[in-house]
Image: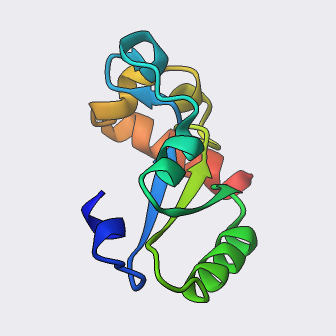
């Protein structure tokens, strides 16, 4: 609210919106939807993007630089642990470190994708 109130037009936030937290789906704890409308209600310019598409993210950032008079937020819809099968399937890794073996397997999956 303060960013909009003070016309922080040089502020661009990116929200990694994977819809999970350490204990499970966010929706189980507190409903955030309609997420983009809530940002707009607080006076932010809102764009949404596939958070795994770097080109799209860059385009949205460039567009946000053109917005005048209001802060901007880019909601990046992501898949937690994208590209690493054991992480995509298990939200408990949201706040837990991988073992050395798991980290090596994760690197292999990412490099092979």
Up-down relation of residue 12 to residue 83 (above or below): below
The quarter of the picture where residue 74 lies is bottom right
The quarter of the picture where residue 55 lies is bottom right
91 or 39, nearer to the observer: 39
Left or right: where 55 falls relative to 109 = right
Q: What is the total number of numbered labels drawn onto the structure image?
A: 0
In percent of the image, x 44 and y 72: which residue is there?
Answer: 71
In percent of the image, x 48 and y 62: which residue is there?
Answer: 44
Up-down relation of residue 31 to residue 100 (above or below): above
In percent of the image, x 38 and y 18: which residue is there?
Answer: 30
Q: Position of residue 36 (x, y in %)?
A: 58, 45
Q: Position of residue 66 (x, y in %)?
A: 61, 89
35 or 50, nearer to the observer: 35
Up-down relation of residue 105 to residue 60 (above or below): above
Up-down relation of residue 32 to residue 109 (above or below): above
Q: Position of residue 34 (x, y in %)?
A: 58, 32
Q: Quadrant of the N terminus?
A: bottom left
Q: How is the image coloured?
A: rainbow
Q: Position of residue 49 (x, y in %)?
A: 69, 57
71 or 88, nearer to the observer: 71
Identify the residue at the far top of this view.
Answer: 28
Left or right: where 52 falls relative to 95 = right
In percent of the image, x 47 and y 82: which residue is there?
Answer: 69
């Amino acid at each position: 609210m303060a960013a909009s109130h003070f016309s922080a037009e040089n502020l661009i936030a990116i929200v990694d919106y994977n819809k999970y937290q350490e204990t499970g789906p966010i929706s189980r704890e507190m409903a955030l939807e309609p997420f983009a409308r809530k940002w707009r209600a607080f006076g932010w310019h809102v764009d949404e993007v596939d958070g795994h598409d770097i080109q799209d993210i860059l385009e949205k950032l460039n567009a946000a630089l053109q917005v005048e008079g209001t802060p901007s937020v880019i909601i990046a819809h992501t898949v937690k642990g994208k590209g690493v099968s054991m992480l995509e399937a298990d939200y408990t890794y949201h706040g837990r470190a991988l073992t050395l073996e798991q980290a090596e397997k994760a690197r292999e999956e990412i490099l092979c994708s």
